């Protein structure tokens, strides 16, 4: 078993943090340094972005992946980044430690099949309209290729209320923990869509049994090229981590 996946299985709570997208070398090195100091385990950063609008920032591509790698290596952190196209598989296998499948690609079965043939841990996000049954069936596409290093991630499902971007399904976290045998993560940033309630969603995910949390962080979120409205700053991240650890200590939860 891959060392990083082994650690995730052993850890009580694994923390992934970083920007939605890698925007520049300076930005990712600065965030990597600060999140390392905050006790984060894995650096995240998108280089290939699945933006709703084709006019929005699409990511730095291969250069972004290389920047993420260089920043993480400097601070001794593993990296996770999202693959959007099966044709990038070789690039991801060479440069990235954990490959993320975003919610839009949960139904991309050729991509999932190809990931099943790799030896990389794969974090698969639940589609925003996917039932748990559909989600676990998507996971089977990776399993069937022989790759069992799978991390599940609840990132919010679509609701009717625009007050939040999505609805964090804490019941799903609890159910996936019961049945799947895989580490279950939560992504409160994409569920909230707004910075102010990211801490509370982190705490509820941990209380529901999450094994890990993925949080978007930015040092100047007004200038962020994607998802600035939901990014927390480093000080908030530190507070979130401290409180999540306390909640994790309550074994009865
Ligand atoms: C992301 O992690 O930046 C992302 C795009 O996530 P999702 O696929 O959950 O929207
Ligand atoms: Mn994002």
Image (cartoon, helix red, strand yellow):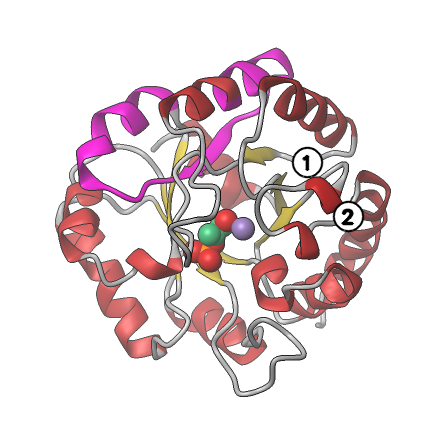
Residue 224 figure quarter: top right
Q: Residue at x 19, y 40 (%)?
A: 86
Q: Which residue is labeled 1 in the image?
A: 40
Residue depicted at 59% across the width and 41% down the height: 225
On the image, which quarter does residue 27 sit in? top right
| Of callouts 2 and 1, the N-terminal one | 1
* Residue plotted at (47% across, 38% down): 46
Picture coordinates of residue 74, whole percent (x, y): 61, 12
Q: Quadrant of the C terminus?
A: bottom right
The numbered disc on residue 241 is 2
Q: Nearer the viewer, residue 17 or 145?
A: 17
**Element class at badge 1:** loop
Q: Is residue 110 above or below residue 3?
A: below
Q: Over which residues does the magenta segment extend? A: 68-95
Relative image position of residue 196 (x, y in whole percent): 79, 63
Label the magenta part by its dominant secondary structure: helix
> Where residue 245 appears, x then y in whole percent?
77, 52
In this view of the protein, can residue 183 be seen by the observer? Answer: no
Residue furthest toward the front? 55
Residue in front for this viewpoint, 170 or 168: 168
User: Distance between the Cα atoms at labels 2 and 1?
Assistant: 8 Å
């Amino acid at each position: 078993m891959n060392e990083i996946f082994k650690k995730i299985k052993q850890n009580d709570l694994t923390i992934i943090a970083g920007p939605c997208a890698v925007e520049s070398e300076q930005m990712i090195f600065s965030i990597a340094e600060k999140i390392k100091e905050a006790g984060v385990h894995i650096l995240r950063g998108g280089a290939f972005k699945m933006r709703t609008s084709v006019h929005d920032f699409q990511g730095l591509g291969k250069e972004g992946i290389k920047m993420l790698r260089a920043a993480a290596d400097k601070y001794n952190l593993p990296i996770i980044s999202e693959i959007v196209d099966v044709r990038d598989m070789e690039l991801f296998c060479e440069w990235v430690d954990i490959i993320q499948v975003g919610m839009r690609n949960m139904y991309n079965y050729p991509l999932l099949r190809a990931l099943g043939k790799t030896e990389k841990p794969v974090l698969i996000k639940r589609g925003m309209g996917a039932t748990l049954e559909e989600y676990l069936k998507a996971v089977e596409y990776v399993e069937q290729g022989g790759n069992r290093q799978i991390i599940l991630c609840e990132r919010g499902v679509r609701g009717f209320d625009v007050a939040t971007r999505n609805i964090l399904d804490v019941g799903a976290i609890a159910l996936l923990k019961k049945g799947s045998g895989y580490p279950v993560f939560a992504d409160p940033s994409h569920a909230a869509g707004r910075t102010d309630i990211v801490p509370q969603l982190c705490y509820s995910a941990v209380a529901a049994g999450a094994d890990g949390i993925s949080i978007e962080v930015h040092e100047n979120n007004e200038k962020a090229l994607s998802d600035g409205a939901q990014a927390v700053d480093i000080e908030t991240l530190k507070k979130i981590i401290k409180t999540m650890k306390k909640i994790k200590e309550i074994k009865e939860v």
